[in-house]
Image: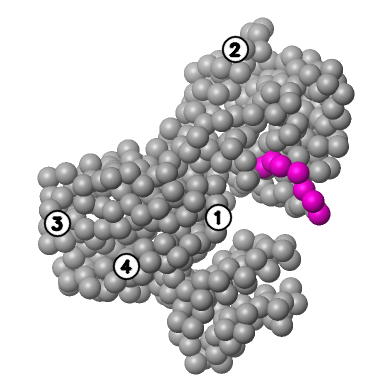
């Protein structure tokens, strides 16, 4: 049996393989030098727009692929602060602070310039739209008559009510000139290619970055229903209520409803693809693999308890797989915060909840890592957490009770004292979370 340092090394290498499979610069370069090469080569101008956590690397991939015709490339991509490196022809604009999910005036200015670029396209020009996780906050362009502050206040109220991501997206799209297909509808050139790194379960085109180039299934009537269901119609800014009611009455144009023939969507990276790469790495390291897939959602602590049950079954009954084995878990869970929460993120909470449920009975036969592929986990400086039963032993020595930290959603403080925080820095990509449980 390997010692825990080997398990730690194996787990991190398997996680790294999944992140590497979603490396945006390589994926974009491959796509533009492969299937799209001849189409792009004949365009008088190539307009590059977009936004997201992977935006900088994706833009660099475009310049790599079009190195021999960069004089025909013009573009702007909104990225988080710290990713705004100088490129040759594509401007990278820092549109929000790193670690923040709030749109900014700088993001609005960048988005408006993108819309203008697309609107001014010639009939033979081609557009490349680079979309990745975080793009919704990085591509703000409120509709006329609604300020960014009013839109943010509406979003804040929905978030406080526990609105789902689908509810939030429906509202945001109807308050945006760019989301819900608005970016594609404003393009007047020959063809638009939307290159996508997906950070959403199931990879739905209308949800990733709120679907700037995809048809939108929601309507103004849906938005009114959502606002009424959460009883915030009287609380939202008057400009928002007025605009939504005008839309529901048919006096404001709806979001895009049908696919546009000149728009092609291409998903280059996804959680499922990354899990397959992690699976190959685990097999190479000598583990049997149970890949639970990329559709894992729900409350983080409950998902962790279910996974702990699988681990216990493997340890005692060798079911559903024989050790040495690796359980791979993708998707993206949620944490429902109560009043006065502590510090942490869904990945840190997953590791703590899993280890707490296993207790000390698993001995040193289990190692787990759970981390966001973007290098971020909640409002913390960590990507997630990793460790085994020794973390519980350290907690016992320090007099720390894991259940108290779980109750307060304060996993960061627990791991800060016991060890286990995973720091990667921004990875430049985003394909949700990868969780790995090694069992010897």
**Residue at mark 3:** 72
Give the alpha-carbon distance from disc 1 to disc 4, as whole Å.
21 Å
- Disc with the residue nearer the chain's start (2 vs 3): 2
Q: Is residue 396 magenta?
A: no
Give the alpha-carbon distance from disc 3 to disc 1, as whole Å.
33 Å
Looking at the image, residue 129 lies above or below residue 408 = below
Give the alpha-carbon distance from disc 4 to disc 3, as whole Å.
18 Å
Give the alpha-carbon distance from disc 4 to disc 2, as whole Å.
51 Å
Give the alpha-carbon distance from disc 2 to disc 3, as whole Å.
51 Å
Helix, strand, or loop for circle 1? loop
Q: Nearer the viewer, residue 433 or 79?
A: 79
Residue 6, disc: 2
According to the image, what is the colour scheme of the structure?
A: one colour
Q: Are marks 2 and 1 in contact (CB under 8 Å)?
A: no
Q: What segment is highlighted magenta in the picture?
A: 339-345
Q: Are marks 2 and 3 in contact (CB under 8 Å)?
A: no
Helix, strand, or loop for circle 3? helix
Horizontal side of residue 415 vs 253, given as left or right = right
**Residue at mark 1:** 101
Q: Nearer the viewer, residue 127 or 285?
A: 127
**Residue at mark 4:** 113
Q: Are marks 4 and 2 in contact (CB under 8 Å)?
A: no
Answer yes or no: is residue 11 visible.
yes
Rendered residue at 29%/71% (across/down): 116
Residue 374, disc: none
Rendered residue at 81%/27% (across/down): 358
| Residue 161 percent coordinates (x, y) | 73, 66
Rendered residue at 28%/45% (across/down): 86
Q: Which one is in front in this view, the residue at disc 4 or the one at disc 2?
A: 4
Q: Are marks 4 and 3 in contact (CB under 8 Å)?
A: no
């Amino acid at each position: 049996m390997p010692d825990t340092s080997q398990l730690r090394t194996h787990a991190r290498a398997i996680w790294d393989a999944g992140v590497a499979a979603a490396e945006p610069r390589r994926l974009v370069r491959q796509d533009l030098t492969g299937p799209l090469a001849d189409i792009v080569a004949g365009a008088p101008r190539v307009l590059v727009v977009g936004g997201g956590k992977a935006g900088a690397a994706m833009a660099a991939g475009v310049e790599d692929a079009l190195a021999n015709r960069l004089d025909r490339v013009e573009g702007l991509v909104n990225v988080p602060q710290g990713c705004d490196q100088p490129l040759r022809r594509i401007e990278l604009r820092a549109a929000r602070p790193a670690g923040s999910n709030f749109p900014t005036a700088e993001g609005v200015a960048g988005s408006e310039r993108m819309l203008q670029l697309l609107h001014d396209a010639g009939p033979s020009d081609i557009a490349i739209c680079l979309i990745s996780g975080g793009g919704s906050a990085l591509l703000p362009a409120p509709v006329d008559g609604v300020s960014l502050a009013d839109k943010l206040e509406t979003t804040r109220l929905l978030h406080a009510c526990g609105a789902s991501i689908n509810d939030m997206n429906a509202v945001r799209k109807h308050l945006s000139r760019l989301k819900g297909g608005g970016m594609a509808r404003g393009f007047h050139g020959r063809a638009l290619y939307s290159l996508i790194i997906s950070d959403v379960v199931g990879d739905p085109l209308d949800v990733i970055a709120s679907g700037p180039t995809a048809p939108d299934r929601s309507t103004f009537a849906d938005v009114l229903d959502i606002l009424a269901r959460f009883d915030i119609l009287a609380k939202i800014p008057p400009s928002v209520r007025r605009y939504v009611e005008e839309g529901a009455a048919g006096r404001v144009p709806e979001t895009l409803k049908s696919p546009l023939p000149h728009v092609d969507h291409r998903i280059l990276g996804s959680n499922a693809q990354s899990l397959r790469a992690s699976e190959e790495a685990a097999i190479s390291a000598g583990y049997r693999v149970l890949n639970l897939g990329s559709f894992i959602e729900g409350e983080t602590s409950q998902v962790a308890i279910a996974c702990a049950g699988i681990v216990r079954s493997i340890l005692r009954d060798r079911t559903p797989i024989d050790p040495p084995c690796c359980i791979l878990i993708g998707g993206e869970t949620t944490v429902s915060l109560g009043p006065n929460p502590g510090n942490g993120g869904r990945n840190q909470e997953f590791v703590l909840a899993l280890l707490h449920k296993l207790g000390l009975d698993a001995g040193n036969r289990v190692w787990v890592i759970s981390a966001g592929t973007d290098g971020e986990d909640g409002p913390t400086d960590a990507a997630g957490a990793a460790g085994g039963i020794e973390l519980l032993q350290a907690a016992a020595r320090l007099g720390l009770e894991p259940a108290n930290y779980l109750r307060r959603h304060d996993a960061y403080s627990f791991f800060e004292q016991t060890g286990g925080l995973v720091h990667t820095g921004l990875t430049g990509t985003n394909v949700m979370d990868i969780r790995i449980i090694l069992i010897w």
